[in-house]
Amino acid sequence: MSYSPGTHLIATLLTSQIQLIESYIAFKERTDELIECYSLQKLGEVYHNFSPSGFTGVVCLSESHLSIHTWPEHGRVNIDIYLSNYLRENDGTVQGLYDAILNFLNASTASIQYLKR
């Protein structure tokens, strides 16, 4: 197998489902489901709720990471997903995670960048 380092996706989302981006609880649950679904290995995580609302979160994976930062007052979400292709091809997994998060938040894409590393 020829090694390519992987895909790094960085996006800003817009959503009117404010209740989903005020606290990390529902997002964390969905992310844990996705990590299991895609057979990724979680090494650690940090989530923090802001006052009065909004959250940030980072999930460290053996394949790399997934992070989120929300601004409920603006209906905005920043997502950052990078998965290495070291042990397996994960480019499709990056897209699958992104699509699932987009669907979960009932969001639209304001901007997106794909970086082939």
Image: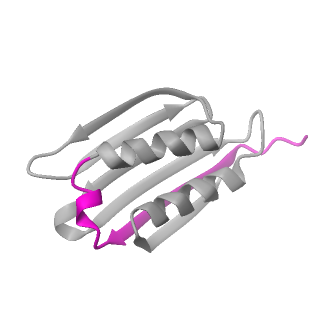
**Quarter of the rendering containing residue 105:** bottom left
- Residue 61 picture location, percent across and down: 55, 32
Residue at 48% from the left image edge and 39% from the top image edge: 32
Residue 100, placed above or below residue 34: below
Position of residue 56 measured from the top left corner of the image (x, y, whole percent) = 29, 45
Q: Is residue 113 left or right of residue 93?
A: left
Residue 6 in percent (x, y) is at 69, 47
Q: Residue at x 54, y 65 (%)?
A: 113
Question: Residue extending furthest top?
Answer: 43
Q: State which quadrant residue 9 falls in.
A: bottom right
> Is residue 117 something one can see in this rendering?
no
Is residue 43 shown left or right of residue 21? right
Q: Is residue 16 magenta?
A: yes
Q: Is residue 27 visible?
A: yes
Residue 88 image point, x, y percent: 78, 39
> Colour scheme used in the picture?
one colour
Magenta extent: 1-23
Could you tell me which quadrant the N terminus lies in?
top right
